[in-house]
Amino acid sequence: MKVKIFEFNPIRENTYIAYDKTKECVIIDPGCFFQEERSEFLDFIVDNDLVVKHLLNTHMHFDHIFGNEFIYEQFHLLPEGNKGDEFLLEQMPLQMEMFGFKNDGYKAPKIGKYLKENDIVTFGNQRFIVLEVPGHSPGHIVFYNQEAGCVFAGDVLFRGSIGRTDLAGGNHQQLIDGIKGKLLTLPGDTVIYSGHGPLTTIREEIRSNYYLQ
């Protein structure tokens, strides 16, 4: 499996396209906000002849779903995510206002398919297992590809840090418990694709992440 990483919007959110030799792909947390970001994103898909099978959201905070409407317009795919974060779609204007973003009529598409613990998402020759890891948001999920040895962790776990828990529905202890119970139990060489910042591994976070000691 190959992974293309984009860093989008002023909050520097990581958007991912995961694909393989079949040319099928999934989009994870499209944060493309500016027109040039959307063009760059679409050009990559077109230039590589990719077929988009799923639009996946780890959670529904505004910086991770800016591109959902654009993806729907281009590929007629509604986002797939956890029901626990559905309320955040209604709070989109408030979220944007809190962080100084002007809302020029942005519409957050509804969740088209609910994902829950142990659901399986498939595309090409790939298989993602859904794990529920709330705490940063009530419905936060991650996508684990055991065969490829990686996990798309959204804003749960970063290199040397963890997700903030002071936003709506956040819970620090719940987040810590979820990380230790569901992520740190994965093989040490599992690559972590986070919602912000550089890549890391499970082994590195066990060894050096201050918040998990």
Image: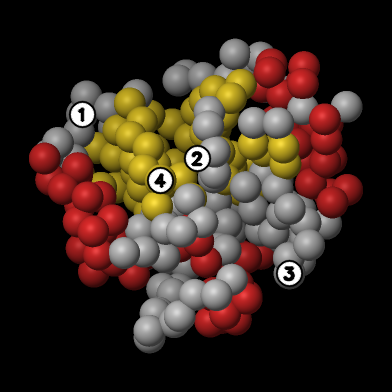
* Mark sitting earlier along the chain (4/1): 4
> Which residue corresponds to mark 3?
168
Q: Residues within 10 Å of mark 3 (few under 14, many from 20)?
A: some
- Tell me the distance, in whole angstroms, between the alpha carbons under discs 2 and 4: 27 Å
- Is residue 156 in view from this perspective? yes
Who's the residue at 62% across and 47% down the image?
155
Q: CA distance from mark 4 to mark 1?
A: 25 Å
On the question of residue 113 being in view, the answer is no
Q: Quadrant of the N terminus?
A: top left
Is 159 situated above or below 141? above
Q: Which type of secondary structure does the marked residue at label 1 adopt?
A: loop
* Mark whose residue sits in front, 2 or 4: 4
| Residue 41 picture location, percent across and down | 25, 50
Circle on res. 7: 4
First of labels 2, 4 by sequence position? 4
In space, the residues marked 1 and 2 are separated at their CA atoms by: 19 Å
**What kind of residue is marked 4?**
Glu
To which residue does mark 1 refer?
Answer: 22
* Image height of 25 relative to 203, above or below: below
Between circles 1 and 3, the one closer to the viewer is 3
Mark 1 or 2, nearer chain start = 1
Q: Earlier in the sequence, mark 1 or mark 3?
A: 1
Residue at image coords 88%, 48%: 173
| 130, 68: nearer the viewer | 68
Q: Amino acid at mark 2?
A: Ile
* Cα–Cα span, label 1 and label 3: 40 Å
Q: Residue at x 36, y 31 (%)?
A: 3
Number of marks in the image? Answer: 4
